Image (tube, coloured by chain):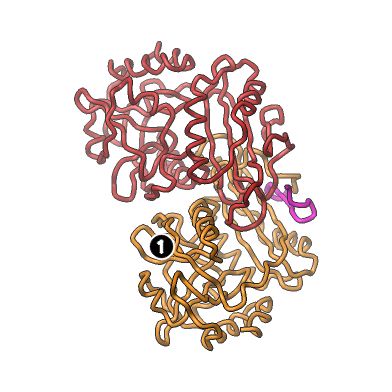
Chain colours: A orange, B red
């Protein structure tokens, strides 16, 4: 069951530990943040963006971070020059029972190395409209925090429906994202992606695409998404994932503008260059 | 930092383990449930109610539970006949990265023993209106799940304000609860407590009081709470906690109806008998 020790390193502040304490606040309350990064030849081309989002979340939640250079050095050692997924998890320090955050306790953190995911299904993803809605919570919106039960429930729905991913709406019916990816929607000649100011995650891949695609942040309805000329999902591990269907709506593969988006992404992260070649 | 090994027992299914796996889903996503129980002379008088809520949460989230009798036996050993707080944490099985729940993996779970909390401040609690709002999420409402960042943020606010606890409203302005306790409000001769169908936790102590107090579930506004004739908080560890103030509103100590509620509670849990004597 347990991840092989060679694939995980745990720390409290600057001290390497065998494991996070059993009373750590990540386990107790999901009181932490994480980043999931794609490493290419042992490097993390989007490190700065991941760390910036982590630092923003830490500031908003009042969680202390370990030193960036030390984390980077540990990540480099763990990666050992390979292609992999690297997950960094940081939890608020302290192990006392109760919600009150402890002052001054060093953060717990963990690096883990994982295999690259399988290639996405040829022809594109089959998507499902999840019944699970995202609650509106501006205090947590945009952050990649560890309170992810909504995503777990939604993903289970998509799996049960035999689909590759699920699309989530907020309680007011606005489309937000997939369970583990952001959403881009082509309407005419313009790319749109939902804002993430009330719920959802401000994805690192999404951020890397906003400018090259000249995309607009737009609240979108179910009808607007279904009427789109093309749709893709994206995240920092899998890059751009073309969408083949959403319920009964089908999109033909090989849309030239999606291929162009994949090439734009490959410019900023060489790990996605192969995808771009196949688009 | 780490809890003393003697105070914590960890398991995967029926197997005792040194610690939950570093990739466990509680740590990764808050994908779990917990119960915090007050033990009296090594017994857990409210065990049935705690287990029932845990089972309800597990059914709603699709999390497998360990066998009840085995958990109870382990809890009894850990308590060793004493008075203590016992925390039971159950996380969904599986350690693979990604939100998709793994089928068939045995749940991880952990029992930990903690000292009884200090006595509440004489004269009653000072409460604070938290700016943090609870998001409305009926899929998770009522459950004691491990996604508790809202409570952490709200509790930090109350601490910063120098108060003992914080009261939370939902996004529509309805009063819901304190960060770690339910709320009862006396209006005239009638006790009211907010419903927990949209957010909040269906507290075990709350459940034990509904009938003896003949309390009504009512959506309450800030003004209605502040106009109350008496207010108390309650949870399964601390029992009934009289409230002295809420912002500038003061309530005199020693309200006869609150003392009566404490006596009612002591009937169902001997751990609260001492409180009732002092009310």
Using the rendered view, name the quadrant where residue B208 is placed. Answer: top left
Image position, residue B64 (x, y; %): 58, 41
Residue at 55% in and 76% down? A208
Q: Which residue is mark 1?
A: A169
Task: Using the image as rendered, state which of residue B103 and residue A3 is in the foreground.
Answer: B103
Q: Residues within 10 Å of mark 1 (few under 14, many from 20)?
A: many
Residue B183 in the image: x percent, y percent? 35, 32
Position of the C terminus of chain B by quadrant = top left
Of A129 and B161, the residue lying toward us: A129
Is A137 located above or below residue A99 in the figure? below
Instruction: Describe residue A267's horizontal placement relative to residue B274 as left or right.
Output: right
Q: Position of residue A100 (x, y in %)?
A: 50, 39
Q: Is residue B51 above or below residue A162?
A: above
Number of marks in picture: 1
As drawn, which residue projects farthest toward the top? B277
Q: Quick check: can you spot residue B214?
A: yes
Q: Is residue A2 magenta?
A: yes
Chain ID of residue with mark 1? A
Highlighted magenta segment, given as a residue range: A1-15
Report the front residue among A106 and A221.
A221
Percent position (x, y) of residue A193? 44, 73
Residue B132: tell me if it is visible: no
User: Please, which residue is most extreme toward the left here?
Assistant: B188
Q: Is residue A203 above or below residue A131?
A: below
Q: Quadrant of the N terminus of chain B?
A: top right
Instruction: Tell me, yes or no, whether the highlighted magenta stretch contains residue A4.
Output: yes
Residue A189 located left or right of residue A75: left
| Secondary structure found at label 1 | strand
């Amino acid at each position: 069951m347990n991840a092989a020790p060679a694939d995980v390193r745990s720390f409290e502040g600057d001290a390497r530990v065998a494991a996070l304490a059993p009373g750590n606040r990540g386990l107790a309350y999901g009181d932490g943040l994480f980043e999931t990064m794609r490493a290419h030849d042992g490097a993390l081309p989007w490190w700065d963006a991941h760390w910036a989002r982590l630092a923003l979340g830490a500031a908003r939640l009042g969680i202390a971070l370990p030193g960036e250079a030390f984390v980077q050095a540990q990540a480099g050692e763990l990666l050992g020059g390979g292609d992999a997924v690297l997950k960094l998890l940081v939890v608020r320090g302290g192990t006392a029972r109760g919600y009150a955050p402890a002052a001054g306790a060093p953060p717990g953190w963990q690096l883990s190395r994982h295999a690259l995911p399988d290639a996405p299904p040829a022809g594109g993803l089959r998507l499902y409209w999840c019944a699970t809605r995202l609650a509106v919570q501006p205090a947590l919106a945009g952050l990649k925090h560890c309170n992810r039960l909504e995503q777990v429930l939604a993903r289970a729905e998509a799996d049960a429906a035999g689909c590759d991913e699920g699309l989530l709406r907020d309680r007011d019916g606005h489309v937000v994202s997939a369970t583990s990816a952001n959403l881009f929607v082509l309407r005419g000649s313009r790319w749109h992606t939902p804002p993430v100011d009330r719920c959802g995650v401000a994805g690192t891949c999404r951020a890397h695409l906003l400018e090259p695609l000249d995309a607009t942040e737009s609240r979108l309805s179910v009808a607007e998404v279904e009427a789109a000329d093309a749709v893709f999902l994206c995240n920092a591990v899998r890059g751009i994932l073309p969408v083949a269907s959403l319920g009964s709506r089908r999109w033909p593969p090989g849309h030239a503008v999606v291929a162009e988006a994949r090439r734009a992404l490959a410019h900023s992260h060489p790990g996605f260059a192969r995808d771009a070649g196949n688009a």
